[in-house]
Amino acid sequence: MCGIIGITSIRGNFREPIGKVIRRCLERLEYRGYDSVGIAVIRGNRIEVRKGKGKIAEVSVRLNFDSVDGETAIGHTRWATHGKPSDENAHPHTDCTGNIAVVHNGIISNFLELKEELMRKGHVFRSETDTEVVAHLIEEYLKMGYKPFDAFKAALSRIQGAYALVVAIAQEPNRLYFARNTSPLIIGIGHGANFVASDIPAFLEFTNTVIVLRDGEYGYIEPGKVYVEKDGVPVNIEERIRLISWTPEMASKEGYPHFMLKEIHEQPIAIASTLAGIDEREFNEVVNAILNSRRVFILGAGTSYHAGLVGDYLFTSMLGLDVHTFISSEYRKYLNAVNDGDIAIAISQSGETIDTLVAVRALKERGVKVVAISNVIDSAIPRESNYTIYTRAGPEIGVAATKTFTTQLVVLTVLALKLGLALGKITSNEYRGMIDLLKKTPDLVQSVMTNLEGRVKALSIYISKRQSAYYLGRGIGVPLSMEGALKLKEVAYIHAEAYPAGESKHGPIALVEEGYPVVFSILDDDNVDALLGNVMEMKARDAYTIGLVPEKYVGKFRDLLNVTLEMPNIDYRVAPIVYVVPMQLLAYYTAVARGYDPDRPRNLAKTVTVE
Ligand code: F6R
């Protein structure tokens, strides 16, 4: 889960040192890892490497990245897997001669055998990483007289595992080699420069013309050329060139202190764009595929799993479908149970989460049809699925998923409504009414932010001093609570757990004492009275009760709540899209109050590409 970038350009292309350009590209990849950072620049006939432990802002100043000039460079920002974060383990890694530099995202599973073999041949290793073997392997093949591309290919044939690699070889100052196997890698075609990176925002400042590489592909970029091969055969890439609609502004903070806050605030536009981008034909195909299936399986990881649970609720309670929702990495449980009569909905904003990808492959092998819901065009999960619906949230850089969650909910709700209409579970009037309501959600989200942001910020001061919190709800409020708790846990490092409110009496309530925060999601459904009882139970134990309450029930709950966050009166089926927003803001402001950087939560990376 590292971020890698390579640039090769014609002389004078950037009007600033390439070290500065690559530093900026790395800043946009930092969400993928931030243990250490490094760059390698080809200068004359040698490679200069600068790298160290720490975040980009600090390391790049300490090692003066901005001053390094040249035409061809690679860079890396690391999320440690093999070897602790340290200066030595930071990428790029070089061979014994220092003329080959490698950056890598993924895991080379057979690196120990290769390392022993290479050490026996006299290679000296300087890091504990799996990556370094690649540099020494290429060195070995060059020594044997291979040409650089052949040496690169020979090295690839020896390594196993998941990888995205970019390699600079000093003797070829205008070329960078790359290879993709499982870990994402995207080529950016610019003017006077070409790029290869783990994600599009890295080079968005320079180009929005991209080719998403596929597993097993490798090749090289030069300033005016892109060459891709698979299994020794050239790949026709012309037809795979895409112009993406993301703008550089979308990938910058635009005055916000953090991407997370910016992305929370972008939700009205992200929701509106996703609704506007609905392709009726695409949805109808998916609706028909679901109608022709026996059972529906929904899978995802983290926030995407929570979106799946909201979908599950709609599909089950509103439509009466036979739905099973699971966390992607637990797919093995279902393998004996599924067959070609089933359909799966795989949710992944990045489209690259390995747990979900592996599950999709296993389900497909058993004949299950797969629908992907993703925010990234041409990413692995959509590519391997039978159908794809894209959310149109724009790039999400903050590690915590925010606008991709609400847009996933939009897609799932529209799908549920279309299915409801087709199955005769809802009337066309009701369908139109619900679609109209969905169209109002951008405004509703905006007004909730305008009305509540200040109060949530004040509340965050209280929460920031607590060690633990509960999030309780009923019905569709349960996955909503799970998402609220995950946000607080991951960015503010406060232990937060979600439960069905009814279940809270069966154990969790034992922890509740004076001042213990309990966040209730109260929706306009038939759970209101039962929730009233649950709030009373918590209040009786002196909990600090916080409620997201529809305006019409505010009076009913007022005396029982320490903090009432008034929500619009809105159909409960659409409510999660609006209700999650104050919870995201609460997590954000609590993280800030505790002095943490919500964009870079410790131990986390945006896209998890290891199982
Ligand atoms: C939480 C978060 C993660 C992701 C999870 C799945 O804020 O960001 O839990 O939701 O890693 O990622 P995708 O949706 O890319 O498959």
Image: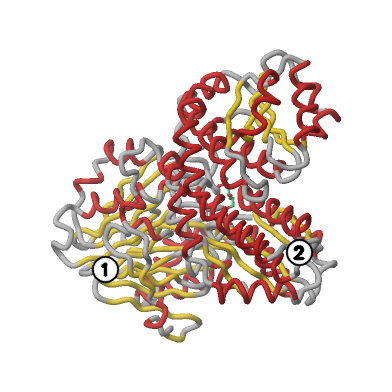
Query: Which residue does the image show at 66% across and 60% down from the upper left?
Result: 430
Would residue 593 be seen by someone viewing this image from the given angle? yes
Residue 520 image point, x, y percent = 68, 31
For the residues marked 2 and 1, what is the alpha-carbon distance in whole angstroms?
A: 51 Å
**Disc number at residue 190?**
1
Query: Which residue does the image show at 46% across and 62% down from the upper left?
Result: 134
Q: Residue 69 vs residue 170: left or right?
A: left
Which of the two discs, 2 and 1, labels the residue nearer the N terminus? 1
Type of the residue with mark 2: Lys
**Disc number at residue 425?**
2
Q: Residue 271 vs residue 253: left or right?
A: right
569 shown above or below 493: below
Type of the residue with mark 1: Gly
**Which of the 4 image quarters holds residue 111?**
bottom right
Q: Residue 451 vs residue 74: left or right?
A: right
Q: Quadrant of the C terminus?
A: bottom right
Residue 468 image point, x, y percent = 66, 25
Which residue occupies the extreme front position in the image?
Answer: 429
Mark 2: secondary structure: loop
Would residue 111 be seen by someone viewing this image from the given angle? no
**Which of the 4 image quarters holds residue 394?**
bottom left
